[in-house]
Each structure stands twice: as structure tokens, then as C-alpha cells.
Image (cartoon, grey):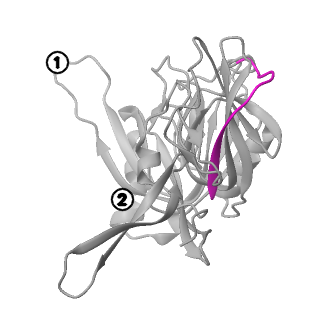
Amino acid sequence: MTKNRRSFLKAAGLAAGITSAAPLALTLQGTGIATGAAPGPRPATRGGFALELEGSVVGSLRGYSGGFPFGEVRLARIGTGPVDKAIAGVGFEDIRLEAGAAMDASIWSWIGAMLSGSPTSKSGAILMMDGDYSLTHRLEFRDAYISEVTFPQFDGASKDAAFLTIGIAPERTEFKVASGAGIPAGGRQKRWLASNFRLSIPGLPTETVSRVDAFTVRQVFTEERGRMVPMDLEYPNMALTLAEVDSGPWFDYFKEFVLNGNPVGEKDWLLEPLGPDLSVLFQIGFRNSGIFKCSLEKVDAASDNPARITVEMYVEQMTFEALV
């Protein structure tokens, strides 16, 4: 295993929370490998983060985590002796980003290529800025693929801002001290609320859909000659909540598709997150989708809230297009 190959044992990177503080790292002399020691004093006031792809800044980030190297431990036993442990190579955590709707088109096309099954690799950097929006550090990454994209929960009752969480799997990372002008974090942000969305499913009522649960698409990798190679995509099941008053057509669809075993009832449908002016920000397409569960949500007899149903559907393919 070569030392500059990223590891597929990257769960620690994805499990880490998004940080709002500059990470602490330095470069080992002669190796270019970032490690977990401090490069210098942390800025007194944090200005934010930005993403650079292929030499161009594509927008500000809400936060990020990951990107640190780690030693891959090898286990070996000789005869009946004790298990021997040693460092067999160096891997790199996935980098996890939180991005709003104001990013450049290049990152949306990168996501769209991944979701459609045509992933591409890119190099770039996470830019870290102080309170004056001057650069302080760069976390550079090379030959990275998108490893997963998580879309937020869409909820008509929510007042929260919405963000995409994007995992990228780099072959190599390097942490550097930097200087120069950055970009104001949020200066280009377009408000994206989790409550603003539109759903269209042919032949089914969607006007009362009040919630679409968060969902994640994951890229599966294999290894060839010490490098990661994208393989299949893992598409999620989708969960929707809508008013019981519209339940009739949904239960009819469930009966025909599941109980009667009609395999021709798969549907192509569209989820469209909306901006403050109700213009379409993104079009998320779901292809060859079919219902597999339809049930009445638990209702408290003393509650005045209207009854709702929950629906779950599988998805075979997805598409993504940004209109911002």
C-alpha cells in the first residue's frame, strides 16, 4: 500500500461533526503529509470558510470537517506467536462540507455528474479566513471524488435555513499556512429555507405533502492499483408525509403496486427546493420509483392536529440540476 493513497477506511472522517473553527495541523518535513499539530495561533475572530475547485473559488461554506491523515494498522501473526501490529500506510479522512444555495455552477455540475452515475475527480482547497476575511490557512486536496451528498429534511413548518452536506474522498491532503484576500462568508449566500419546496408525482396528489425526510446518496468505491475507482451508487428510499385527506389515491396506488403486484406502476417524479421568491433553486429527479409502504401516522385522540399519512418509496436513479 503506497503512503500517498487515501484509505477506504474513512468512517472517522464522515462521522466527525462540521467544525466552525480552523483545524490544527502541520506538514511533516519531507513528506507533505498533514498531521494533527497546530500550525500557529488560531485567529481571534473567525471569518468563515470557502471552497476552491480547480483554482477558482466557488463560494463560501457554512463549515467543514475531516481531511486529516491517519495510519493504517496492519495485523499479522507469525506461527503461534502474538499478533503483531504495525503501520502499513497512510490514509486520509473524507472531507465533509456544508454548502448553501449560493455556490458556483461548477460544484452543482460536480454533484449532478455524481448523482447521474458519471463521477469525476477534482482538486481544490478549503480556504480558512479570519475576522477580516483574510486567508489564514488552506486545506488542499487532490484527485477527490464526491463520496456522498445529503439533502436536508424539507418541512413546511420549519423556519431553518437549509444546507447540503457533501462528502469528498481525496487521494491526498495537505494543510498550509496562507495569506491574501478571502471572500466574505455569507456575502454571496442566497437564503434557502427548508420550508420552501414543491413536489410533483404523476397521478398522485402532492399539494398537502408537508415533509420530505432528509436523504443521502452514496458513492461506492473499489481499489485498483492502489487508487480508488468509483463503482455503483447507493440511492436512498424516500419518505414523505402528507395530509390524510389526500390518502385515497396513495392507498390505491399502494394496493395496485404492492398488494396486486402490478410492476408497471413505477413513477418518475420531481422535488424542487424553492428560493425566497419561490423561484426554483434545484430540480432533483427520481427515476423508476415505486411505493412500498403507506400508513397512517400515529394520532393522539386529544390532539387538534389533522391526521397525516407517511409514504415510503424506493428509487433506482436520481438526477440533479441547479437553476440558481
Q: Amino acid at mark 1?
A: Ala
Residue 174 located within the stretch drawn in magenta: yes
Residue 283 located within the stretch drawn in magenta: no
What distance separates the C-alpha of mark 2 from that of mark 1? 30 Å
* Residue 37 position within the rendered picture, expressed as x and y whole percent measured from the top left: 50, 36
Count residues near mark 2 (Cα–Cα under 10 Å), then give few for <14, some for 14-19, many for 20+. Answer: some
**In which quadrant of the rendered image does the C terminus lie?**
top right
* Residue 210 position within the rendered picture, expressed as x and y whole percent measured from the top left: 46, 30
Residue 249 visible? The answer is: no
Q: Amino acid at mark 2?
A: Lys
Q: Give the answer, above or below, for where 317 lies relative to 191.
A: below
Residue 229 visible? The answer is: yes
Q: Earlier in the sequence, mark 2 or mark 1?
A: 2
**Relative horizontal placement of residue 81, taking residue 24 as reference (left or right):** left
> Pointer 1: what residue?
302
Residue 255 - label: 2
Residue at 41% over, 49% down: 12
Which span is picked out in magenta?
171-184
Q: Give the answer, above or below, for where 264 lies relative to 134.
A: below
Q: Indicate the secondary structure of the residue bearing disc 1.
A: loop
Count residues near mark 1 (Cα–Cα under 10 Å), then give few for <14, some for 14-19, many for 20+. Answer: few
* Residue 73 position within the rendered picture, expressed as x and y whole percent measured from the top left: 38, 64
Residue at 51% over, 40% down: 205
From this viewpoint, which residue is outermost toward the front? 29
